[in-house]
Image (spheres, helix red, strand yellow):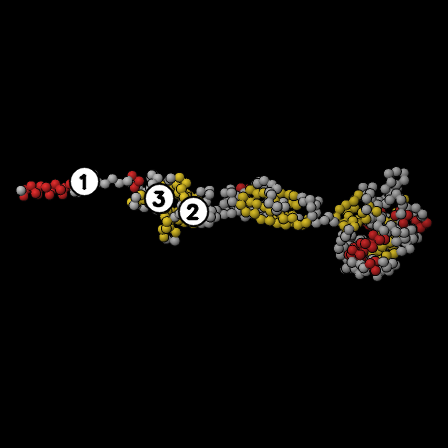
Amino acid sequence: MRTFKQFVFLLLFISCNPDWNNPLEVDEDLKQIPSIETILLNQDSFIEISLNYSYSDDADIVLERKSNNAFKKAVFQFKSQSVLLDTSFDQHADFHFTYRYYVEKDGFKTDFSDEKEFDYIGKSIPKAVFTVSPLNGTIDTIIHFDASGSHDKEDPLLSLQIRWDWKNDGTWDTGFTTLKTASHQFSTLGIKTIKLEVKDTDGFTSTTTKQVLMKEKTTGTVTDYEGNVYKTVKIGDQWWMAENLRSTRYNSNDPEHHTIGYIKDSNTWSTLASGAYCYPHGEPGNVETYGLLYNWHAVNDVRGLAPEGWHIPTDEEWKELEIYLGMTTTEADKTDTYHRGTDEGDKLKEAGTIHWPPPNAGATDEFGFTAIPGGGRFKDGHFTGIGTGAFFWTATSSSNRQIDNGEPTIYNGTGSSPTWGMSVRCVKD
């Protein structure tokens, strides 16, 4: 009886213990050894972690990221079952992370994977730099741009691409190119803002802007019927020749009637009743610098002395110029006196002592009129010397303007003899 009881107890004991040769089955998702295959920063600025692990959809991945010496759970998204995307990061910043993960299912989990470090050195943004020449211009000016000063830490200059927006209006006027220079001509006046964008081989960009000033054109040229070319300048609302006239013909298309007579003899000059010219101080070598001296008959000839589109200024047009220079209307209306205004004559004189005698201290040629002392010829045929003053006819009968050496103002002469010889400046129609 005792033997039987012992046998039954032993049988019960054996049947109540696990089968050591057949332990509980471990879930397939938890049998593998987790590991990290690769870590990289993708083109969308996400850290991409590729896992070396296969698991079913009802298993969970727990990813941890270590920064500041502590592991914390990372919030991630799946690119695929075995590729995780950690938070988006700034590609221009440097950072260092360590990653690990484990798999869990039904309350069970694997061990942590191996720890894998990821170091990233941020990529630089290119620096956009350019120069402009000139910084001021008119609608005739071609502006040159040079972006050769642009640079990038990783890429050489030749690899950088650039494009231009000439009006900074949000629309690029050129496509990307590796050519670093460009030229542009603006068709309107005012301050223009130009934008440059530089792009490196990683697609990173930067922009910068510069400004240029497009001003109204104030200088130019005009050509007379002989082909002589004269500088011109805009002063106020008037366009003036900036050189003395040196034409020897009228603006007639008839070759037999367009020539102006050259008179050297003093007696002939003093009695002449038709148009004539002579050389300043009687010397032909003075013409290129000082132009010609004309009598009133040439100035008043109906065939016209001025180039096409231009004319000899009237007394009123000279007053308009003088008032623009700062002279009051009351002063401008004065005649036969040197004391008209203050320094308007100096504002028209060529500065320096190349043509004016020293010291010529007050001359500024502020507006580019460049009055030079070509002298004149008296009604008796004698010359007043070069350097003494600049004498100009007006289109108003017997009226002239005189700017003298050592005198800052402008003389308004009346009653001038028609046989006097003076320089001529023309004004645009």
Q: Nearer the viewer, residue 407 or 47?
A: 47
Ranked by sequence position, the earlier of labels 1 and 3 is: 1
Q: What residue does disc 1 label? A: 19
Q: Residues under labels 1 and 3: Cα distance?
A: 32 Å
Q: Report the residue at 88% width, 48% height from top.
A: 299
Dot 2 lies on which element?
strand
Q: Report the residue at 58% width, 40% height from top.
A: 175
Side of 211 where 427 appears, left or right: right
Where does the image place residue 406, in percent across and percent down from the top left?
A: 81, 60
Question: How many residues crowd around disc 1 within 10 Å: few (fewer than 14), some, or many (20 or more)?
Answer: few
Side of 159 where 73 appears, left or right: left
Q: Residues under labels 3 and 2: Cα distance?
A: 16 Å
Q: Nearer the viewer, residue 362 or 399?
A: 399
Q: Can residue 369 be seen in this snapshot?
A: yes
Q: What residue does disc 3 label? A: 61
Question: How many residues crowd around disc 2 within 10 Å: few (fewer than 14), some, or many (20 or more)?
Answer: few
At label 3, the amino acid type is: Ile
Quadrant of image for the N terminus? top left
Ranked by sequence position, the earlier of labels 1 and 2 is: 1
Where does the image place residue 84, in percent across and percent down from the top left?
A: 39, 43
Ranked by sequence position, the earlier of labels 3 and 2 is: 3
Q: Nearer the viewer, mark 1 or mark 2?
A: 1
Where does the image place residue 187, in percent across and percent down from the top left?
A: 69, 44
Question: How many residues crowd around disc 3 within 10 Å: few (fewer than 14), some, or many (20 or more)?
Answer: some
Residue 402 lies in quadrant: bottom right
At label 2, the amino acid type is: Thr
Dot 1 lies on which element?
loop
Q: Can residue 286 be seen in this snapshot?
A: no
Where does the image place residue 307, in percent across and percent down from the top left?
A: 82, 44
* Mark drawn on residue 87: 2
Q: Report the residue at 78% width, 49% height from top.
A: 239
At label 1, the amino acid type is: Asp
